[in-house]
Amino acid sequence: MADPWLVVGLGNPGAQYSGNRHNVGQMVLASLAHRIDARFKTHKTNSVVAEGRSYPAGPRLILAKPNSFMNLSGGPVAQLLAFYDLEPDRLIVVHDELDIPFDTIRIKNRGGAGGHNGIRDIIAATDTGDFTRVRVGVGRPPGRKAAADFVLQDFAGAEREVLPNLLDEAADAIQMIAAEGVEAAQLKFHTAGE
């Protein structure tokens, strides 16, 4: 049987951050966990973890939300890979992305941090950028608002109406990556709506 996929949703711990744009990765995991009927439980890797099958006969997914702050995600991710004895090529990291318009997802396989501090910390802790990212667009801050302030705000009213669909689309992308591979998922999700 094929190795499972470790899917990590980035964000910040605590109820005060739960609706922030920066926590969209963890929101996607909550949506996916509900879909595959998996329950999050405390794990010794400083994370909460839920496990289930993507489809009845599909690949096993290990969903993890680190209990650390976004910029310190690397330690828990490295611990999770070691605990489950997985290579980074079985890792999918779901995170917010300022350089992508809101209500858009992009899939990236391997590479650098692209200015994202959570990704930078994961690369530093695992000593590699050879993992897949599901990048969930949150758009650029309006006017002169600082990016750090923007991502630590909750989604606006109009965005909240669309958000469930965006979370579902990102969950679809994760399931497709696990079942059919990164290239198939890129082909589908990068051309959607174009």
Image (spheres, rainbow, N blue to C red):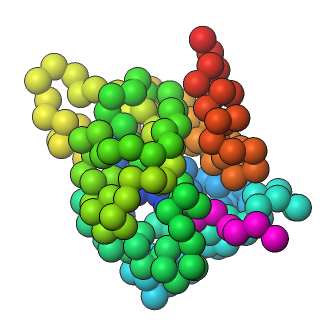
| Residue 37 vertical placement versus 152 (above, below) | below
- Most extreme residue toward the bottom is 44
| Image position of 91 (left or right of 71) | right
Could you say where residue 39 lies in the image, as x and y percent from the top left? 64, 73
* Residue 2, image quadrant: bottom right
Could you say where residue 40 lies in the image, as x and y percent from the top left? 58, 74
Residue in view at x 72 percent, y 55 percent: 35
Q: Pick whichever, 89 or 172, lies toward us.
A: 89
Could you say where residue 127 lies in the image, as x and y percent from the top left? 33, 64
| Image position of 85 (left or right of 172) | left
Residue in view at x 46 percent, y 88 percent: 44
Task: Answer whether residue 128 is magenta in the image.
Answer: no
Q: Is residue 18 visible?
A: no
Could you say where residue 101 lies in the image, as x and y percent from the top left? 40, 24
Q: Specify the segment rendered in magenta.
A: 1-6
Residue in view at x 37 percent, y 59 percent: 128
* Residue 10, image quadrant: bottom left
| Image position of 173 (left or right of 18) | right
The C terminus appears in which quarter of the rendering?
Answer: top right
| Residue 166 vertical placement versus 67 (above, below) | above
Q: Pick whichever, 171 or 77, lies toward us.
A: 77
Question: Magenta-highlighted stretch: main secondary structure?
Answer: loop
Task: Answer whether residue 4 is magenta in the image.
Answer: yes
Q: Is residue 95 visible?
A: yes
The N terminus appears in which quarter of the rendering?
Answer: bottom right
- Most extreme residue toward the top is 194
| Residue 143 vertical placement versus 27 (above, below) | above
Q: Pick whichever, 102 or 74, lies toward us.
A: 74
Residue in view at x 42 percent, y 79 percent: 79
